[in-house]
Image (tube, rainbow, N blue to C red):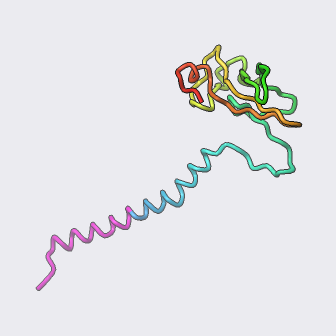
């Protein structure tokens, strides 16, 4: 009793195809996935005792020493409401540096701003972004 010729031809194609698909899956798993995760993270590794890197909360540009974010702070305790307009790179609004809301990930309206709470402690100011005038007006409140 011999092997069926169509079955042998099928196996000669099927087995290499299975190995090819497994190879593509391994390539995706071991090479493509880690590269995508690396691209999503935009921060730099900085030693803890090294220079502090400050970024604009709206356009994510690394700010130089002396650069300030244009904002308006309202009185309050323990936190203060703040309207953040942008850094010198993105305010006034321009086509080079887009102002992106950290909450809704959409472009901040031209006359809009980002709404945040500012917490002040000795030697440090920290902001917690609540949204932009676009997403806060649509009812996506935190």
Q: Residue furthest bottom?
A: 1
Q: In the rendered structure, does residue 114 fall within the stretch colored magenta?
A: no
Q: Residue at x 62, y 27 (%)?
A: 131
Tell me which secondary structure the magenta stretch mostly adopts.
helix
Q: Is residue 4 magenta?
A: yes
Q: Position of residue 116 (x, y in %)?
A: 69, 27
- Asked whether, in this view, residue 51 is left or right of residue 70, the answer is right
Q: Is 110 on the left or on the right of 14, as rendered?
A: right
Judge by depth and name the residue closer to the eye, 58 or 92: 58
The image quarter in which residue 53 lies:
top right
Looking at the picture, tell me which residue is in the foreground, 70 or 35: 70
Q: Residue furthest top?
A: 111
Q: Nearer the viewer, residue 13 or 86?
A: 86
Q: Position of residue 106 (x, y in %)?
A: 56, 27
The answer to which quarter of the image holds residue 17 is: bottom left
Magenta-highlighted residues: 1-21
| Residue 15 against residue 79 in the figure, above or below | below
Image location (x, y in percent) of residue 97: 67, 26
State whether residue 23 is above or below residue 125: below
Answer above or below: position of 52 versus 139: below
Please provide percent x and percent y for residue 50.
86, 48
> Which quadrant: the C terminus?
top right
Q: Is residue 102 left or right of residue 51?
A: left
Residue at the limit of the structure toward the left, as seen here: 1
Task: Name the residue: 59% across, 24% down.
Answer: 107
Tell me what residue is drawn at x 47 percent, y 62 percent.
Answer: 26
In which quadrant will I find the N terminus?
Answer: bottom left
């Amino acid at each position: 009793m011999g092997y069926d010729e169509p079955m042998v031809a099928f196996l000669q194609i099927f087995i290499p195809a299975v190995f090819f698909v497994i190879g593509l899956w391994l390539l995706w798993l071991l090479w493509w996935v880690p590269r995508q995760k690396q691209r999503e993270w935009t921060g730099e590794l900085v030693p803890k005792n090294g220079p502090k890197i400050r970024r604009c909360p709206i356009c994510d540009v690394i700010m130089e020493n002396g650069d300030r974010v244009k904002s308006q702070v309202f009185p309050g305790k323990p936190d203060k409401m703040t309207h953040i307009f942008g850094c010198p790179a993105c305010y006034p609004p321009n086509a080079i540096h887009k102002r992106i809301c950290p909450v809704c990930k959409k472009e901040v309206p031209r006359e809009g701003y980002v709404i945040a709470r500012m917490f002040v402690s000795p030697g440090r100011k920290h902001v917690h972004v609540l949204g932009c005038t676009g997403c806060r007006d649509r009812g996506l409140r935190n």
